[in-house]
Amino acid sequence: HKNYIISLANLCRWLAEQAEALGVEIFPGFPANEILYNDDGSVKGVATQDMGIDKDGNKKDSFEPGINLLGKVTVFAEGCRGHLGKQLIKKFELDKGKDPQQYGIGFKEIWEIDEKNHEEGLVMHTAGWPLDNNTYGGSFMYHAENKQVFLGYVIGLDYKNPHLSPFEEFQRFKTHPEVRNVFEGGRRVSYGARALNEGGFQSVPKLTFPGGCLVGCTAGFLNVPKIKGTHTAMKSGMTAAEAIFDSLETMQPGHEPASYADKLQKSWLWAELYKVRNIRPGFARGLWLGLAYAAIDTYMLFGRAPWTLRHHADHLALRKAHEMPKIDYPKPDGVISFDRNSSVFLSGTNHEENQPAHLTLKDNSVPITHNLALYDSPEQRYCPAGVYEIVRNDDGSEPKLQINAQNCVHCKTCDIKDPTQNIVWVSPEGGGGPNYPNM
């Protein structure tokens, strides 16, 4: 109650206009590709990516070199599992003494539905189905204006069964009568997928380091029970700005804005995350125990339990393929449920084909000798865009992993869930990826 249902993409465009009117320079389409360091090891800034490089690393006719963006303090706001934030956390040991970050894969579709099924302002959340009771997940449905409905489903990436396909679970969710009835006669207009932080309070890393700080979902500020992190991301960014401004006249290059963490710990954001810290790990023993614990923690203990439940890394959760049951997913009907290819088409995803791969492997042998052999290649299923395929030739030669990088919707799931952390996501050429007009 007393909230609004809006498009975050449209809000961001409006905010960009306000920022530019204040003199802020915004460079869309130029990804921060590399962290730059001072001689003393502090962060000096970032370098944008060279443009016009072919897949073999050669300069094309369209080559444009990247530029260095330097500052006394650099604020990293890359969202969930940012590839530069990941490097900073490792280099400065920002996660020392913290629980591993946990993640979910979130799917979202926008539908235009029949007027008789539309109830502007209606919000619905569900938990569980069609997942089994040992897998964390649930949905949201928002009835927005203009007969549009925003539908989403989130699945915890600590799931154990390598045969599970998060995309297929989302499509199956829509076949439930209470959901199908809303969308029959409607039209799907957009699709997207993105990983989101689920570690919460106990997984928040040290927020500052020489020359910079982390804000938003790069730091993991999502309120997991509410599946909301925009308000906390904005608050962290505002708090970081205040802390930096306080020292602006006296700071030297490589300044560590330590007061940012102090200010944040005194804010409502810190109190909000602390209060719900035990909800997500409470589901580690299953849906029903999780729901029971959540009720006790919220309505009896008011988030003030004298204990804090712990997290474990998602990529270590998978069990061997032969230990877990296979899942028979129904074929999409093209009316309510759909396949990956038609979904990726709706995301507006596009990458220049002749560019260096942005989905890289530390060891090219691992996908076959380890992932296929032990887990039946789970990357074929956890990717929501059909990027990863095991290809077998008719001549009976050895199978190989084919990476269809042009399909990538930049969700970061592969970078998170790969059992040996062999897949590393790096920034593609600027402007590539999904195009979400109203998501």
Image (cartoon, helix red, strand yellow):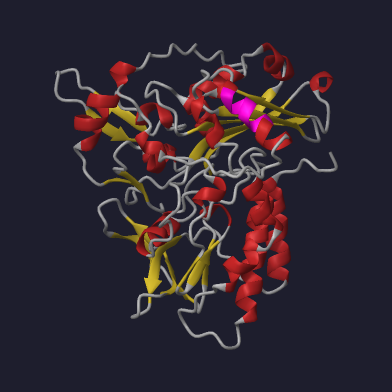
In x, y percent, where is residue 282? 55, 33
Relative side of 293 to 67, left or right: right
338 and 212: which is toward the camera: 212
Residue range corresponding to the magenta coloring: 289-295
In x, y percent, where is residue 141? 70, 29
- Answer with the quarter of the image where residue 319 lies: top left
- The reply to whether the magenta stretch includes residue 364 is no
352 and 421: which is toward the camera: 421
Instruction: Name the residue located 44 percent from the left edge and 43 percent from the top edge.
Output: 412
Q: Among all residues in the image, which is located at the extreme front?
A: 306
Instruction: Please indicate, yes or no, whether residue 24 appears anywhere in the rendered image.
Output: no
* In the rendered image, the vertical position of residue 369 relative to residue 358, given as above or below: above
Q: Which of the image's four quarters has the N terminus?
A: top right
* In the rendered image, the vertical position of residue 214 relative to residue 376, given as above or below: below
Relative side of 92 to 74, left or right: left
349 and 69: which is toward the camera: 69
* In the rendered image, the vertical position of residue 37 relative to residue 409, given as above or below: below
Relative side of 324 to 103, left or right: left
Instruction: Name the residue located 36 percent from the left edge and 31 percent from the top edge.
Output: 379
